[in-house]
Image: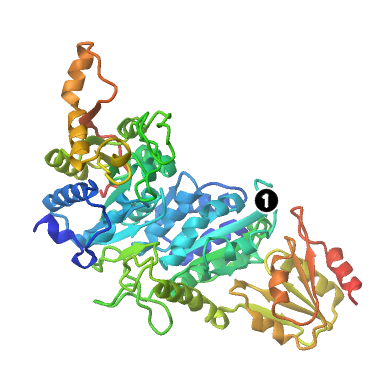
Amino acid sequence: MTRIEFWQGNTACAEGALAAGCNFFGGYPITPSTEVAEHMAAKLPKKGGVFIQMEDEIASMASIIGAAWTGARSMTATSGPGFSLMMENIGFAVMTETPCVVVNVQRGGPSTGQPTMSAQGDMMQVRFGSHGDIAIIALCPATVQEMYELTAKAFNLADKYRVPVFLMADETVGHMREKIIIPDKVERVERKPLAAGALPFKADADLIPGFGQFGTGHHVHVTGLTHDERGYPAATNPKLHHALVKRLVDKIENARDEMADYDVINPDAEQVFVAYGGPVRTVQQVMHDKKDKNLGFLRIRTVWPFPEKALAAFRNARHFFVPEMNLGQIAREIERHVTVPVVSIPKLGGELHSPLDLSAALEAHR
Amino acid sequence: MSYEDWFRQDRLPHIYCAGCGNGTIINCTLAAIDQMGWKKEETVFVSGIGCSSRAPGYILTDSLHTTHGRALPFATGVKMANQALNVVVFTGDGDLAAIGGNHFIHACRRNINLTVVCMNNQIYGMTGGQGSPTTPVGCLSSTTPYGCAEIPFDLCDLAIAAGANYVSRWTSYHVKELEKAVKAGLETPGFSFIEALVQCPTAFGRRNKFRQVADHVEYLRAHSLLKAKYDRMIENGEHVPEDMFVVGELMRRNRPALGVKP
């Protein structure tokens, strides 16, 4: 039975994870993500899952990777400072093709910054923060409903593509309370298992190898070193390293259209907003207030890999307006894909843009 | 079955230098595991980064060769998610006590049901011989060219103080004792810590007057003080020379443990 609740975003995130079958959570308290861990601590043991509070975020990330190799659907939640600490092990998860979900309820940085205030300052860190060339998947919820749905979806993407998937929320969406409709059940995509006798890191045509779950007799060696299809270290082989890193990136980048998730509103408009996460709500208010067919809106949920084709839907666009709670991180990505001016509308300080902030930008670029 | 059946024959030869003590420790560990009658598909080896951490790559089980210092939290994830798996961690002094020091004390505090075998060569071998948290005072390394001035960790004292259920120290000379100690560790629920002092001729020995591998092994033997003898000396008020270290079973207790299958 679907039911209606009035929930906080972080609660919806945890419940979305549980609905998706998450059975391992390793975490460390940090504002403004702590409620996710608290909810999992209360609920997971009753469902036969494991909650463990680790000694820091490095250990949290490590624990969910270890759990994932036993077949668990594993997850952690953090915010900026903890996210920075996770970077090395995030790269390990990419290199070892470990499915797992990392929630980042973003707060103001750099450093300790604004623990209780909202931001989107980690959008580039999630994409490029770990060393070496990597590709990951990042989803951005703008509502409590999406905190639930995108968290559940993150597990499916992680298992399908064997990559860490990030729910890049922000304090606004994480801490707001609003109506949410809980579905009967959520879709579940299973990991492709490793066939008996197959090499554990030999990819199929989709560039994804079968998963050799620990404890099932595959005798898989998992290493962060550059490895061959057997999983054995081959760290000084230039061609092999090139081929491995290229495959790890291509398996995500080549599937960008398949996992694109966005709404195109008023595709004939000349003035077009592009937003993800919290700022979506301010754009919606402006669209509602102005009721102007010449105002378009590209609302993005899958931010990485960036759905560049969506921009082409706005054939008449003269300007793209990009409100972000950072100094224009995704605006710069958009600039790479369009020929018309991209107007970044940055907002630092921890609060959402006001509708007036966006109207002023529109006025300035008539 | 013999311990040799546990090796991945297709990965040989290994990377260890001639005269390295790590192979001895790996053999002792596998011999102990073999005696336990564990199945390969129920056993997982986890390690971090360093010479000792390469060991899981040579063993024919599921294994996780992770990031520097982080073997214990990875192993914690494996064990907590599937308590039916036997999880053994190979680590070294730099991996465990420097970059991984915080994870070490918390794994002991949780008393999580893992067996940790630390190959302590008192140096960073893989990176070419830098001082580690267990490099003895006065010893030469590439980062202590005038002699190490810092006081080293006693890893076993650390494990005991932090709450581990089983703690032993032996050396690469004491193969039979080490094998028994690892077996006792495998049998003890909770966190089991076995420190094995090993020679590293390439990075430690050649800088510290051990021209022959056997000289270093002999040094380890001669400076080992059996726990019973050490206790007697303390009881009699005798002086314990500072360059001696205690070997034997240093702790066996039954604190409540995490990750023990009911």
Residue A201 shown left or right of residue A131 in the figure: left
Q: Residue at x 43, y 51 (%)?
A: A51
**What is the quadrant of residue B240 in the picture?**
top left
Regarding residue B192, the answer to whether it shows in the image is: yes
Q: Residue B98 is drawn in which quadrant?
A: top left
| Residue A129 horizontal/vertical position (percent) | 57, 60
Identify the residue at image location x=13%, y=58%: B4
Task: Estimate the x, y position of residue A119 in percent, counting from the top left.
Answer: 69, 57
Could you say which is closer to the camera, residue B16 or residue B158? Answer: B16
Tell me: residue A59, above or below residue B166.
below
What is the quadrant of residue A103 in the picture?
Answer: bottom right
Please state the horizontal and vertical placement of residue B139, each as a whole percent of the image: 35, 33
Looking at the picture, tell me which residue is in the foreground, B202 or A85.
B202
The residue pinned by badge 1 equals: A110
Residue extending furthest toward the top: B237
Q: Give above or below for A141 relative to A337.
A: above
Neighbourhood count class around disc 1 (C-alpha, 10 Å): few under 14, some 14–19, many 20 upward: few
Query: Label 1's element?
Result: loop
Amino acid type for the residue under numbered disc 1: Pro
Taking B230 as reference, is A203 above or below it? below
Q: Left or right: where does residue B230 sit relative to residue A4?
A: left
